[in-house]
Image (spheres, rainbow, N blue to C red):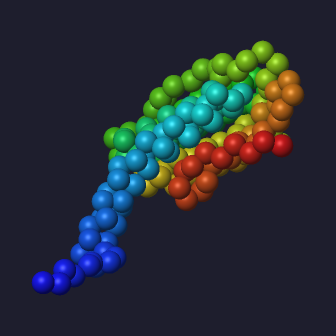
Amino acid sequence: MMRRVRRGFTLIEMIVVLIVIAVTAALIAPALMRVSGAAADDSESAPLSALLRAARRQALAGGSVVTLIVDPKEARYRADTSGPRGTGLLSEGELAFQPGVTLESDSLRVRFSFRPDGSVFGDTLTIRGRWTSSRVSVDRWTGAIHVDAR
C-alpha cells in the first residue's frame, strides 16, 4: 500500500491561523497604545498632555463641549463646560512643570475646545525646557495629542 505524503497547508488551516493572528492583534493593540502614551508622559510636556487628555475625556463622557484656556506666561489653566445640562467651571489651576520649563505662544491665551464627538479646535503651544523645545498640538479630527521635538 502506498502512503500519500501531504505537503503544504489547506485553505481552512490558513484561514484559522489568520483569524487567530487578527484576534491577537486586536487584543494587544490597545495595550500597546497605552504603553506608548505613557512613555510620552515622561517628557517635559507631561502636565500639559495629561490636562488635554482629561479635558477630552470629560467632553466625551459628559456629552458636552469642554473649553480649556491656558495662560502661557503664568502656566495657569481654566476648564469650562457647556452643554444640555448647563454650563460651569470644571477646574482651574496651575500646570506643575519642572523648574526651568516654560510655555510659549503667540497668543496671550491659548484655547482648546473639545467636542462630544472627539473633535478639537485648538491652538499650539511651545514648551521650552533647559535643553529641549517641543511643540504641543492636538489633531483636529481625532483629538490625538502630538508632541513634536524641535
Q: Nearer the viewer, residue 102 or 67?
A: 102
Work out whether residue 59 can be spotted.
no
Q: Is residue 12 left or right of residue 135?
A: left
Q: Residue furthest top?
A: 99
Where residue 110 sits in the image (x, y, percent)?
70, 40
Residue at left offset 32%, top offset 78% = 7
On screen, residue 52 versus residue 2, left or right, reads right
In the picture, measured across the screen, residue 109 lies left or right of residue 144, that is right
How far across and how far down the image is residue 149, in percent? 78, 42
Rendering quarter of residue 31: top left
Q: Quadrant of residue 108?
A: top right
Position of 119 with respect to 84 (left or right) is right
Which residue is at a point 78% across and 15% down the rendered structure image?
Answer: 99
Quadrant location, the N terminus: bottom left
Residue under the point 55% across and 59% down: 141
Q: Is residue 116 above or below residue 80?
A: below
Q: What x and y, as percent, mark residue 79?
A: 54, 32
- The answer to whether residue 148 is visible is yes
Q: Among all residues in the image, which is located at the extreme right? A: 131
Q: How many marks?
A: 0
Q: Residue furthest bottom?
A: 2
- Which residue shows up at 17% across the image and 84% down it? 2
For the C terminus, which image quadrant? top right
User: In this view of the protein, which residue sits in the foreground, 44 or 121?
Assistant: 44
Q: Return the residue nearer the eye: 124 or 28.
A: 28
